[in-house]
Image: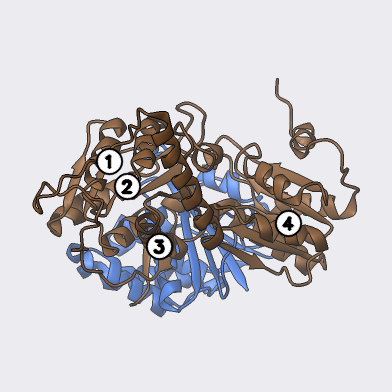
Amino acid sequence: MAKEMMKGNTAIAEAAIRAGLDAYFGYPITPQTELLEWMSVRMPELGRAFVQAESELGAINMVYGAACTGKRVMTSSSSPGISLMMEGLSYIAGTEVPMVLVNVMRGGPGLGNIAPAQADYNQIVHGGGHGDMHPIVLAPASVQEAIDLTVLAFDLAEKYRAIVVVLIDGSLGQMMEPGELPPMAPLKTAIPDWAVRGGDDGKRRTLSSIYLNPPDEEVTNLRLERRWQEVQANEVRYKEYYLEDARYVVTGFGSAGRIALSAVRAARAEGIPVGLLRPISLNPFPRQVIADLSERVEGFLVTEMNAGQMLDDVMAAVAGRKPVEFYGRMGGVVPFPDEILGEIKRMVNGQVPMSGHPRDRWLERMPRAN
Amino acid sequence: MQTEIIIAGFGGQGVLFAGQLLAYAAMEEDKAVTWIPSYGPEMRGGTANCAVVVADEEIGSPFVKHPQAAIVMNLPSLDKYEALVAPGGVLVVNTSMVDRPCQRPDITVVEIPANEIAERLGDRRMTNMVLLGGLLAQLPVVSMEAVDKALKEHLPERHQKLLPLNRQAMQEGASQPARV
């Protein structure tokens, strides 16, 4: 198929449709609205379900119900709307039904603003909803990756009966880039065994997240944990740039990762042996790759559009073997490549202490307004 | 090889569309390209800008601080981007909307009374195309033919009759003298 110029938001929407999305439920919020808007036109046109719910709570619970039928379902929102969905997400995780969630992150906490940010990392990757739950989290950095990972998200959701989150920031949602969409896949006709189907085969099925008897809940918890081990073993994804001969590694996900690529290239042009590791699956996290790198490189720079959330996962993987530095911008402010280049040079030219926390050192360097 | 361009002006001046045309043209030429708007609670008459990056390899940052070129369609945009254009770069100024000359001695400056030219051509909406022509004459990041093709494919049906005028506007802009 030929390439088309698309915004990240519309590319994700159309990719989901081509992947065989049966039903979309959502509520508008900037900087995600084009996704819902695209769905509102395309889904009815194709005879599929589109509902603009009365709120994000309504939307996620409609997703819950529809997911129980074994159909391909999704919703999308931006940070504050995602917070509203957390209860429903936990119920969906506890019921073990597949769904895809798109979070187009914006500045926060609270109402914040509509500018790009990555500050929902901890909420999305490390839980959000209550209970032991593990969403698979994919973080594209380009329109093409957003398309490819959206299609993958539906397959993974069904394979592991899991929630798969496509996590982007507002800038990728709003940015246009050429991308190639997949051909239209036929809608799924096979109904999974676990799905509720209105008793058409005379069998009674109940789907629920309620296990009043604690040992029963524990059996479920163990099943979910073992399934997660399988995800960890099979679904780690990342992209490497210039790492072959790198002595220093920059790492960042999504937009922060691609901005860092410009900084890494600029550093390379000055003869600095630095490479980039861009995690694509944030959950499962490419922990082993980072651990292996920490055996052979001299230091890491983590760059994010938050106060160092993925930083904690990188530090856990590096496990004190090598120094780690951090650079972040927050509140909807996007770092420019030259800021990251400056941080690379600081790391390479100076002595990075092994003691203390990179977040404290970063805060020390940031301006103090009050 | 990578080229970065910022187009800035008031909302309604065709800032975002001019950038999209560049992006479509770059795609037409099989180049890697990103187009990113400044987005916010903005409206007609407010300031608007977009950044376009054209490259022959995977593009890193779509955000640009020091572009090789900028088109500034009004005074606030001149004030903001004059200092940011990379040394040796190109600044295209819509002199119809600014009341001072550009001060940078180290860049190529193209000063175009684009509103007047567009009005002389009979359609004020051509202002952005005049300036785009002025840019492409100094920085041929994409060919005029590719822009032409992009226009043809992306102008709504009801505006297709304006294609020759758009072309003419670009050529008028391209024929404007540059100050090196």
Q: Is residue A340 left or right of residue B49?
A: right
Identify residue type, mark 3.
Answer: Leu
Instruction: Tell me whether marks 1 and 4 sit on the same chain.
Output: yes
Q: Name the residue furthest top.
A: A370
Image quarter where the C terminus of chain B lies is bottom right
Residue A43 placement (x, y as % from top left): 19, 54
Residue B16 placement (x, y as % from top left): 40, 54
Nearest to N terminus: mark 1 or mark 3: 1
Chain that the image shows in brown: A
Identify residue type, mark 2.
Answer: Val
Q: Distance from label 4 to label 2 (Cα)?
A: 33 Å
Secondary element under disc 1, as helix, strand or loop, is helix
Nearest to N terminus: mark 2 or mark 1: 1
Q: Which residue is label 3 attached to?
A: A152
Q: Which residue is label 4 attached to?
A: A291
Disc number placed over residue A97 in the picture, else none: 2
For discs 2 and 1, the disc positioned in front in the rendered view: 2
Identify residue type, mark 1.
Answer: Tyr
- The chain letter under disc 4 is A
Q: Which residue is label 1 attached to?
A: A64
Callout 4 crowding tier (Cα within 10 Å): few <14, some 14–19, many ≥20: some
Chain B pictured colour: blue
